[in-house]
Image: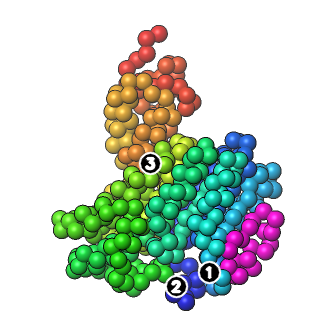
């Protein structure tokens, strides 16, 4: 690992951490209703705090846990770190939270069996943010997902994948490095502890990806580098669907005009409520990102027109989804819409669009009313009354 990796938090890491914090706030009280203790696991915790004083994910998680424990929630945290020097710093940074947060020395895979057992009696959120891409071995992670699934537990995963570094390794392994764009090779792009110019063996790449599918994507000369990243992550997400009901991804960039993301955030859950909570968290972070680049300190809002929510497009899609379904609840319609509009519209925006369609009689409710709850059936045709 680079000696200065934990020296200062990068701007794009702040973006990621804001999503984590925003999500955990509604997540903890919501899953607490299941009646089980809630466990937040930071699988690659690091030092807990950067040398510039900025909090890392352990302090963000610990402070969130503390707030909800004061409100009576049964929630705790586990923070796993393999590097002994980092672990000592981690222990020190978490001292004030002693009693409900627990630093653990070792590799995450060393604790798989224990978490699988605990999953039968606890609700678990896994935050997987390794500072090396090699820390992500797909089959090892799937072992965690499947063991927890067999325990019939509620499990959520937020995974940070530096797909740009992976694809750079892939292109080098296939001797296609000439396809790299400038914003994938500048110094600013390499935020993790990996060396993106390292020669990585194909067997290692297969292990990270969970198969050889990456080879056909990386070797396709018709695909841009950005499209290779999208296609690779889409297949990776589909592989996770073997263990989850919903998997979504979101690219995080340092600048809007960049084609190459710093990393992909991949979120997986077995419950639609989790999908909606994460969608809202990422929508919020997205608006902050756009505001910082195109609004803050400017006389006029310079947000690109392609980033302005297209409500007309959304309403058209909602009508088509309702027509295809025949009859569908408001909640089910929102969840379907997220498959096409993830991180583009918050839950309140989707509800407002549905409400507008009811008022204009382009959608109809089985109650005959326009003010409805999530369980009310909707249709593109009037209900027989």
Q: Position of residue 162 (x, y in %)?
A: 43, 70
Q: CA distance from mark 1 to mark 2?
A: 10 Å
First in sequence: mark 3 vs mark 1:
1
Q: Is residue 61 above or below residue 117?
A: below
| Magenta span | 87-105
Write down the residue under mark 3. 242
- Picture colour scheme: rainbow
**Is 25 in front, or is 144?**
144
Q: CA distance from mark 3 to mark 1?
A: 32 Å
Label 3 SS? loop
Considering the numbered disc 2 on the image, is that residue within a helix, a strand or a loop? loop
Q: Position of residue 57 (x, y in %)?
A: 62, 69
Give me the disc on residue 83. Answer: 1
The residue drawn where x is 40% and y is 45% is 339
In x, y percent, where is residue 275? 51, 47
Q: Is residue 266 visible?
A: yes
Task: Look at the image and tell me whether residue 18 can be seen.
Answer: no
Q: Are the two marked residues, 3 and 2, in contact with CB atoms closer than 8 angstroms?
A: no
Crowd rating for badge 3 (residues with CA inside 10 Å; few <14, some 14–19, many 20+): few
The numbered mark, 1 or 2, whose residue comes first in the sequence reads 2
Q: Which residue is mark 2?
A: 1
Q: Secondary structure at mark 1?
A: loop
Query: What is the quadrant of residue 23 in the picture?
Result: bottom right
């Amino acid at each position: 690992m680079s000696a200065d990796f934990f020296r200062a938090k990068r701007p794009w890491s702040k973006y990621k951490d804001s999503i984590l914090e925003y999500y955990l706030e509604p997540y903890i009280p919501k899953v607490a209703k299941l009646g089980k203790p809630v466990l937040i696991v930071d699988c690659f915790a690091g030092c807990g705090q950067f040398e510039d004083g900025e909090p890392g994910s352990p302090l963000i998680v610990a402070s969130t846990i503390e707030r909800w424990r004061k409100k009576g929630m049964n929630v705790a945290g586990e923070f796993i770190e393999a590097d002994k020097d980092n672990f000592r710093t981690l222990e020190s940074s978490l001292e004030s939270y002693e009693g409900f947060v627990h630093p653990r020395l070792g590799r995450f895979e060393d604790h798989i069996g224990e978490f699988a057992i605990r999953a039968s009696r606890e609700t678990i959120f896994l935050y997987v943010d390794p500072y090396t891409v090699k820390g992500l071995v797909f089959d090892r992670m799937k072992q965690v997902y499947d063991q927890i699934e067999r325990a019939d537990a509620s499990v959520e995963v937020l995974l940070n994948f530096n797909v740009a570094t992976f694809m750079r390794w892939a292109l080098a392994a296939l001797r296609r490095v000439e396809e790299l764009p400038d914003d994938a090779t500048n110094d600013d792009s390499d935020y993790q502890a990996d060396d993106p110019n390292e020669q990585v063996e194909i067997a290692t790449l297969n292990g990270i990806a969970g198969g050889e599918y990456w080879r056909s994507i990386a070797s396709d000369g018709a695909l841009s580098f950005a499209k290779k990243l999208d296609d690779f992550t889409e297949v990776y997400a589909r592989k996770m669907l073997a263990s989850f009901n919903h998997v979504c991804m979101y690219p995080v960039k340092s600048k809007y005009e960049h084609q190459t993301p710093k990393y992909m955030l991949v979120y997986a859950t077995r419950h639609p409520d989790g999908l909606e909570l994460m969608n809202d968290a990422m929508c919020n972070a997205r608006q902050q990102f756009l505001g910082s680049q195109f609004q803050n300190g400017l006389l006029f809002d310079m947000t690109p027109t392609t980033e302005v929510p297209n409500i007309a497009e959304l309403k058209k899609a909602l009508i088509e989804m309702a027509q295809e379904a025949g009859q569908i609840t408001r909640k089910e319609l929102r969840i379907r819409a997220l498959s096409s509009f993830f991180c583009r519209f918050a839950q309140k925006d989707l509800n407002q669009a549905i409400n507008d369609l009811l008022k204009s009689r382009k959608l109809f409710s089985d109650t005959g009313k326009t003010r409805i709850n999530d369980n009310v059936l909707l249709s593109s045709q009037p209900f027989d009354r």
